[in-house]
Amino acid sequence: MSSTNAFVILAFSRHRTVGAILPSSRRLADAMARAAVGAQHLIELGAGTGAITAALCRCHPGVPILAVELETKLAQCLRERFPMIEVRAAAAHAVLREPHRGSVAAVLVSSLPFRSLPPRLRNRSSVAIERYLIERPASRLVQYTYLPREPFRLRFGESLRWRRLQSVWGNVPPAWIWELSSSHAESGGSRLPMAGNAK
């Protein structure tokens, strides 16, 4: 079974954890990869069929990539398609809590569907991301949404902040790309035009 067919089946049978009915478009994938500029290590959360994984490999040759995917069938497809990177079939929060993760400045590139995730999984994922970034101020998160609002509510005061980087109107549905980083750190994503649109 192809990765796209597996994705479509899971999109209808497990909509809350998949969060979309189609994989990310090439335009969205490329925009997400560009937003990860300067990464020393890439951790992709919710890698799905590998649309964004492929863009990360193209845009960041030589940068270590870890792709994390909860659905075991999709994770196996990722291993077959991208034998040069590490793939984990696991929940994002479980991987981010591993103590050895993040010895260098990492960019978390996330497709996690926070608006549709079951509440318990959503809370575990968002808390794990916040703690990861607070403990590693040189790291940041790049996340997209299908609504022009912040992906999830922050729980730990003013130590982190959201920034909306750009819109991708050529995706179905249109998407907005966000960055979450330390309130005091210079953003790697600031090199992107804040009001820019990818059409």
Image (cartoon, grey):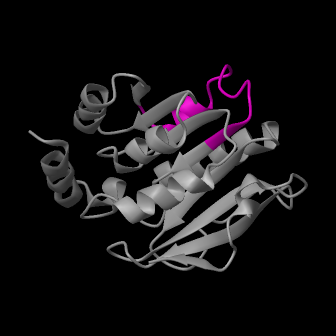
**Residue visible at 51% across and 63% down in the picture:** 144
Q: Which span is picked out in magenta?
A: 90-107
Secondary structure mostly taken by the magenta-highlighted segment of the chain: loop
**Residue visible at 43% across and 79% down in the picture:** 169
Specify the farthest residue to the left. 1
Q: Nearer the viewer, residue 108 or 89?
A: 108
Specify the farthest residue to the top. 100
Is residue 181 placed above or below 197 in the rendered structure?
A: above
| Quarter-of-image position of residue 166 | bottom right
Does the magenta-highlighted stretch encompass residue 27?
Answer: no
Q: Is residue 198 left or right of residue 79?
A: right
Specify the farthest residue to the right. 184
Rendering coords of residue 65 (x, y %): 51, 31
Does the magenta-highlighted stretch encompass residue 101?
Answer: yes
Q: Answer whether residue 118 is visible to the viewer in this image.
A: no
**Residue visible at 73% across and 58% down in the picture:** 155
Rendering coords of residue 79 (x, y %): 30, 26
| Quarter-of-image position of residue 1 | top left
Q: Is residue 150 left or right of residue 16?
A: right
Is residue 133 placed above or below 17 in the rendered structure?
A: above
Q: Nearer the viewer, residue 44 or 12?
A: 44
Rendered-image quadrant of the C terminus: bottom left
Q: Answer whether residue 100 is visible to the viewer in this image.
A: yes
**Residue visible at 41% across and 27% down in the picture:** 88
Rendering coords of residue 170 (x, y %): 38, 75
Q: Is residue 86 left or right of residue 180?
A: left
